[in-house]
Image: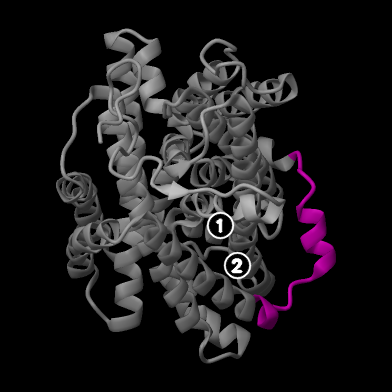
Amino acid sequence: MDTRNEKGLMPSLSEVHRSIPVHSGKFWRRLSGFLGPGYLVAVGYMDPGNWATSIAGGSAFGYTLLSIVLLSNFMAIILQALSLRLGIASGQDLAQACYDAYGKKARWFLWLMAEAAIIATDLAEVIGTAIALNLLFGIPMEIGVLITLADVALIFWLQGKGFRKVEAVIVALTLVIAVCFIIQIAYADPVMGDLLSGLVPQRDILESPMMLYLALGIIGATVMPHNLYLHSAIIQTRSYGPSNAEKRDAIRMGTIDSTVALMFALFINGAILVLAAATFNATGRTEVAEIQDAYELLSPILGLSIASTLFAVALLASGLNSTVTATLAGQIIMEGFIHFKMPAWARRLVTRGIAVIPAVVAVYIYGDSGTAKLLVLSQVMLSLQLPFAVVPLVMFTADKKRMNGLHAPRWMTLTAWLIAIIVIVLNVKLIYDVATGAISL
């Protein structure tokens, strides 16, 4: 069946567009049809890049940056709600909306920024998965990086099983990550008073260049640009009705799914930082930044022989999870911005191949000890690219005509603009610190 829209264009992710039925009737029955997309988005908020920034932040500054994790999660909830609203109300994903709204030069620029974000995300996944393979099975990092190319087959197989199967695998792997961290946090026994005080923003974050650098890394690792493109597309896999009342209900159900899933991601991200603060910072090991060092130290410090293994298993699950969502986001971005369609396996091979090159170079030059710097840098790069996705998103969702009368409430638009301004100001401060030598990359 041809599902072209009124402009003669294929819908986002056309092979699974409106493929998942939704239900009418009671609240829980309606909600059940929308459970899933939020978790695909949430896994991007707990990828290996998050691990590097949270471990470095927790070991160096204790619980102080926990407030940034909380702030980032609030930003994510607002922006992802806008993203799914755009997809439902306009029938376009964010990339398609940009193509429709801007001229050729602007489209190509935004496409390049989005592709750079995908590559930065993929780089973190490559290194994180390679580290996990090394820790669990002793596979050399150089070989592990190359093995990650094989996950193209995994993605291709999963997509062939249907979108609900993809969502089920994502949820299962996310539960594995959660269980691993629940056990480790229980043994870490963090000081609750210090933990709660860490939730309150501190002025030191703005005054310390290194703390600001890690704070931006946490923001970039949490509010990922590619997730905004992803959510606006995958929400359209649901077969909601064409009326505004049905779309309004779909927005409500999708927002609930997204918010709950992101609160789950908040727990995981907070747990990584709390674990680093309670084990490394509390014992004077403030220089722990490498995931490998964290792995080696966890079992002795916690007195739990399986702690390091649980840590590595969670890391592997995180890398595999993020692989799926980055592939989908890459497809959405390429098809939406330049109307170029390629098989999923080919798309994955190209982006993963590009990410493998700097990963191999970094491992060769710096050895295992250089991966943390590259991971944190990749997340800071995501923060620098974030405004190029956020600003169009806020503009589009405030447009009554584009949103067919389902535009965002004024409070949400104003909050989103505030988020955009905060990210831009922090990015400018970072660029200034780098230019003046206050931070050395």
In the displayed structure, 193 sits above or below 391; it is: below
Residue 208 is tagged as none
- Say whether residue 142 is left or right of residue 117: left
As helix, strand or loop, the secondary structure at mark 2 comes to helix
The answer for how far apart the CA atoms under marks 2 and 1 are is 8 Å
Q: Position of residue 111 (x, y in %)?
A: 31, 25
Q: Is residue 394 visible?
A: yes
- Earlier in the chain: of badge 2 and badge 1, it is 1
Q: Does residue 370 appear anywhere in the picture?
A: no
Determine the image quadrant of residue 80. top right
At 52% from the left and 34% from the top, the residue drawn is 241
Q: Amino acid at mark 2?
A: Ala
Q: Residues within 10 Å of mark 1 (few under 14, many from 20)?
A: many
Q: Measuring 51% from the left and 14% from the top, which residue is drawn there?
A: 402
Q: Which residue is mark 1?
A: 54
Q: Position of residue 433 (x, y in %)?
A: 52, 30
Q: Position of residue 81 (x, y in %)?
A: 60, 36
Viewer-proximal residue among 297 and 411: 411
Q: Report the residue that reaches farthest toward the front.
A: 25
The magenta segment is 185-203
Q: Residue 204: x and y, percent?
A: 72, 42
Q: Give the residue drawn at x 64%, y 59%.
A: 270
Q: Residue at label 2? A: 276
Q: Magenta segment: does it hold 20?
A: no
The answer to whether the residue labelled 2 contacts the one labelled 1, judged by CB atoms less than 8 Å apart, is: yes
Residue count near mark 2 (Cα–Cα under 10 Å), binned few <14, some 14–19, many ≥20: many
Q: Amino acid at mark 1?
A: Ser
